[in-house]
Amino acid sequence: MFVKLSIVNFKITDIGLEDQMKSQIVFIEKYDLESEKSRLIEITASNEKALLKYENEILDDLRTSDPIKILEDDEMINKLANTKDESNRIKTDNEITKKRDQEIELERNI
């Protein structure tokens, strides 16, 4: 016979509770604003997931490639260049998202 015990900490902070209450009020009064904030959170999470995927792919490629011929591997070089471009695009997107998120926070606090 086996017993499994899970302990969950349901501690609520004042800041977290305040943010949840603001979210609910803004959702009712300014639905578009809260929808955009949710969309920005999804975009940021998607970007982070994409970066992690690219990182893992590169590491796998480096692990499986021949160290002697790595500088001659055009496919790997192209993949690195494409990943760099995509990383720069994601960085720009994250900067725009962060700026818009700050604007939304200002509007939420009014």
Image (cartoon, rainbow, N blue to C red):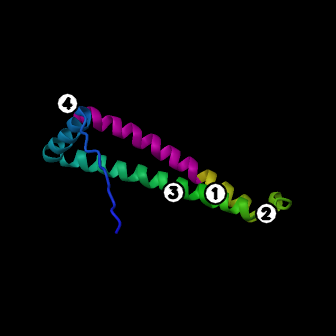
Q: How crowded is mark 2: few (under 14 residues within 10 Å), some or many (20 or more)?
A: few
Image quarter where the N terminus lies is bottom left
Label 3 secondary element: helix
Q: Position of residue 84 (x, y in %)?
A: 63, 51
- Nearer the N terminus, badge 3 or badge 2? 3
- The amino acid type of the residue labelled 3 equals Ala
Between tags 1 and 3, which lies in front? 3
Which mark's residue is nearer the viewer, 2 or 1? 2
Task: Measure the C-alpha gap from mark 4 to mark 3.
Answer: 34 Å
Is residue 89 located in the magenta-colored stretch of the structure? Answer: yes
Q: Distance between the residues labelled 2 and 1?
A: 14 Å
Residue designated by label 2: 73
**Position in image of residue 98 (x %, y %):** 40, 39
Counting residues from the start of the chain, the first of labels 4 and 3 encountered is 3
Q: Which comes sooner in the sequence, label 2 or label 4?
A: 2
Amino acid of disc 1: Asn
Residue 109 found in image quarter:
top left
Q: Sequence-wise, which precedes: disc 4 or disc 1?
A: 1
Q: Choose between 13 and 81: the one closer to the eye.
A: 13
Query: Looking at the image, is 48 positioned above or below residue 66?
Result: above
In which image quadrant can residue 3 be found? Answer: bottom left
User: Which residue shows up at 73% across the image and 65% down it?
Assistant: 64
Distance between the alpha carbons at the discs numbered 2 and 4? 56 Å
Q: In this view, does 23 lie above or below 76?
A: above
Residue carrying label 1: 82
Q: Residue 30: image x %, image y %?
A: 17, 44
Name the residue carrying label 3.
50
Q: Is residue 90 left or right of residue 106?
A: right
Q: Which of 45 and 83 is in front in this view?
A: 45
Q: In this view, does 65 lie to the left or right of 28?
A: right
Question: What amino acid does circle 2 point to?
Answer: Asp
Q: Label 4, on which residue?
A: 110
